Image: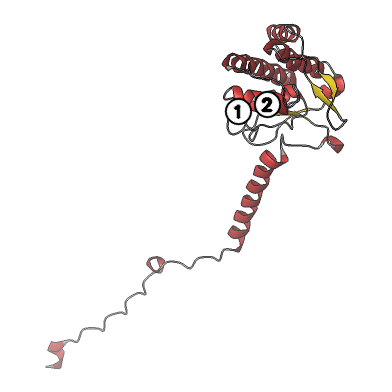
Amino acid sequence: MAAPCDLRFDCGRICLDLVATAGGAPAERLTGPDQLAAWLVGAGLVPPGAPLEGVDGRWVARFRALRELLRRVVHDELRGRAADGDLTLLNSAAASGQPPAARAVRTADGALARTLPGPPDCAGLLAAVARDAVGLLTDVEARGQLRQCAGESCSLVYLDTSRGRRRRWCSSEVCGNRARVARHRRRTMVRRGEAAPTAPPSRAAVPAPAPAPAPAAKNISADR
């Protein structure tokens, strides 16, 4: 399984983290079965070590389709209201499968660990993500915490649970850092512009001195 080195899980909800797999750079993070399997573990939908040998290209296509549906619904709800047809598709996805039921088992050292009774199926995992989205959009308090990233060219949506609700970026380390770097560059350019000395006029721009008047010509005939 590929390590989720470029996967993000900081949007506050599983459904929003799925939408984030198509935002930023690289633009596509679910590039294949290994990346999808890594996302399923990172998002907490399945525990580490769960049997995911069945994840294939068809799973990737179905999760990408749900991701696009979630992107439309969440953004449309932020701007006003989602289309009825998209809500029907979301409800259908939520009801299309049974999310895997995790079990608590005792490990060798006596601790409890979460496991699955068997390999999860794609429809059940899709249903878990869709149900998370339904829960988010129908929870008045959680819905009021939805924010779109203020980063330039970033369309990611996250749940703002910060104190004072002042979080501006989907990620302080990604978009926040970019904004700080851009602000620093602008300030540096302004300071350089104010401190720059006024350039002296070029030599070509300095008017040449007027020539001295020529001495009056002598009347040679008068000297004779």
Question: Which callout, 2 or 1, points to the residue nearer the camera?
Answer: 2
Residue nearest the viewer, comparing 132 with 142: 132
Q: Which mark is residue 39?
A: 2
Residue 15: give x, y in percent of width and height: 73, 21
Q: Give SS at disc 1.
A: loop
Q: CA distance from mark 2 to mark 1?
A: 9 Å
Q: Are marks 2 and 1 in contact (CB under 8 Å)?
A: yes
Identify residue type, mark 1: Arg
Residue nearest the viewer, comparing 169 with 121: 121
Task: Write down the quadrant of residue 134 in the picture.
Answer: top right
Q: Is residue 147 above or below residue 59?
A: below
Marked residue nearer the N-terminal end (2 or 1): 1
Graded by Cα atoms within 10 Å as few (under 14), some (14 to 19) or many (20 or more), the crowding at tag 2 reads: many
Graded by Cα atoms within 10 Å as few (under 14), some (14 to 19) or many (20 or more), the crowding at tag 1 reads: many
Task: Write down the quadrant of residue 190 in the picture.
Answer: bottom right
Task: Write down the quadrant of residue 155 in the picture.
Answer: top right
Residue nearest the viewer, comparing 133 with 138: 133
Most extreme residue toward the front is: 108
Residue at 60% x, 63% y: name it: 195
Residue at 69% x, 20% y: name it: 51
Quarter of the image with the N terminus is: top right
Residue at 55% x, 66% y: name it: 197
Residue 200: give x, y in percent of width and height: 48, 68
Residue 193: give x, y in percent of width and height: 58, 58
Q: Which mark is residue 58?
A: none
Residue at 41% x, 69% y: name it: 206
Task: List the residue tagged with mark 1.
Answer: 29
Q: Give SS at disc 2.
A: helix
Residue 53: give x, y in percent of width and height: 63, 19
